Image (tube, rainbow, N blue to C red):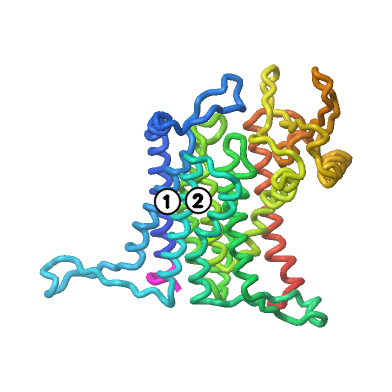
Amino acid sequence: MAPVGLSLDMLICSIFSVGAFWLTLRLIPNFSDLFIKAGLFGRDLGKVDKPQVPEALGTIAAAVYLITMFCFVPVQYVLTEAPDETSKGLPRLQAVRPEGSEFVELTCALLSICCMVFLGFADDVLNLKWRHKLLLPTVASLPLLVYYFLSYGSTTIVFPVHVRPYIGTTVDLGVLYYVYMGMLAVFCTNCVNILAGINGVEAGQSLIIAISIVVHNLVQILSKAEDHANHQLSIHLVLPFVGVTAALLYHNWYPSACFVGDTFCYFGGMTFAVAGILGHFSKMLLLLNIPQVINFVFSIPQLFKFVPCPRHRLPKLNEKTGLLEPSVATFKPTDLSSTGLLIVNTFASLGLTSFRKFEDENGVELIEVSNYTIINLFLRMLGPTNEGALCTRILMFQVACSCVAFAIRYYLAQLLYDS
């Protein structure tokens, strides 16, 4: 249970979150020129004039978030009492002892998030390789996993009622459960980064996921679930994130005045991961990431090099119409393995990607396919559109998937589990 009561805790956290929103909203324009002078900028390839845009401004949002949380912790756990004779007229500070190890949970969560912000900024500056992007989230999540091992240590999962007569009620995954949580951290920190490339989509999808997490936690708290204290801790972690992300989205919305950078993607992903792990709703967290899961599965052929993958897979701007079209990857047939050729033909036959064989001016045979992302898939299915409308469609899909996630969690789950 919260140390100073649910309503007061929520009110304090909400006030801090509003303050974080306002501060982020003001700081981003003030720091934009500084980032450009430092060489942290890029060209907006979705615009005809390719304007110069400051990059990695998600660092500002992450910094404001951490400052907000560092200020929230002492306010949450310290009460001010009225002065008495021994205090010589000055207010007295009294520590509120958190139940169990709640303070340690919060500290480990912030440590993991802080590590991921640092590593994300290093990626923005040094342009790390993909193998590093898979390793770094695992390292950053170690404080959280160690804490989980020392405190809860539960690695048991419960089977649906319909299969219990055949395989039993529960199974202890042991070390595999920690592997799963580590992989969850890796997925969350990279999935937003993969579903990117147009103004507003990274911050927009993160904001929708964060709001969905807050709603899920509120439902659990109001229904007086057994682990409602964990859900309250999750809200404390996510509410300030909603504030800074809303401000970042304001500046990142089409036409974007800043790019969020890899720092924000790592920061947001780790925030979701720690909220899901400490809130004990990792399965619900995956349900809230349905578009990201679909995009990851769809991207596997290129991510794992079965099909050649260009450096940038963002949509291509048709400068004559001003509309975005699916971007393409062009390669020689000899660049494909038998598995890659099977994937290319299968995806093309299903209408998921384009496929074209042609010869260049030197008579070399080439293959051209649209890149394997759901952003390109949206453009292929719905036709060319401008960047703002495309982002709106992606975010509407994210909202629809969140509704599906809630339907699965609160209705379908009742048919599969007895509690």
Magenta segment range?
1-6
What residue is shown at x 46% (from left), y 62% (from top)?
109
Q: Is residue 10 magenta?
A: no
Mark 2 Cα within 10 Å, few/some/many (few <14, many 20+)? many
Residue 105 percent coordinates (x, y): 45, 68
What residue is shown at x 62% (from left), y 60% (from top)?
183
- Secondary structure beneath label 1: helix
Tell me the CA gap for discs 1 and 2. 10 Å
Above or below for 41 versus 247 = above
Residue pushed farthest right?
349
In this image, 397 relative to 199: left or right? right
User: Along the polypeptide, which appears first: circle 1 or circle 2?
Assistant: 1
In this image, 28 relative to 300: left or right? left
- For residue 4, what is the image quadrant? bottom left
- Mark 1 touches mark 2? (CB < 8 Å): yes
- Secondary structure beneath label 2: helix
Q: Quadrant of the C terminus?
A: bottom right
- For residue 9, what is the image quadrant? bottom left
Mark 1 sits on what residue?
65
Residue 206 percent coordinates (x, y): 57, 48
Residue 406 percent coordinates (x, y): 67, 60
Mark 2 sits on what residue?
267
> How many numbered marks, from 0 up?
2
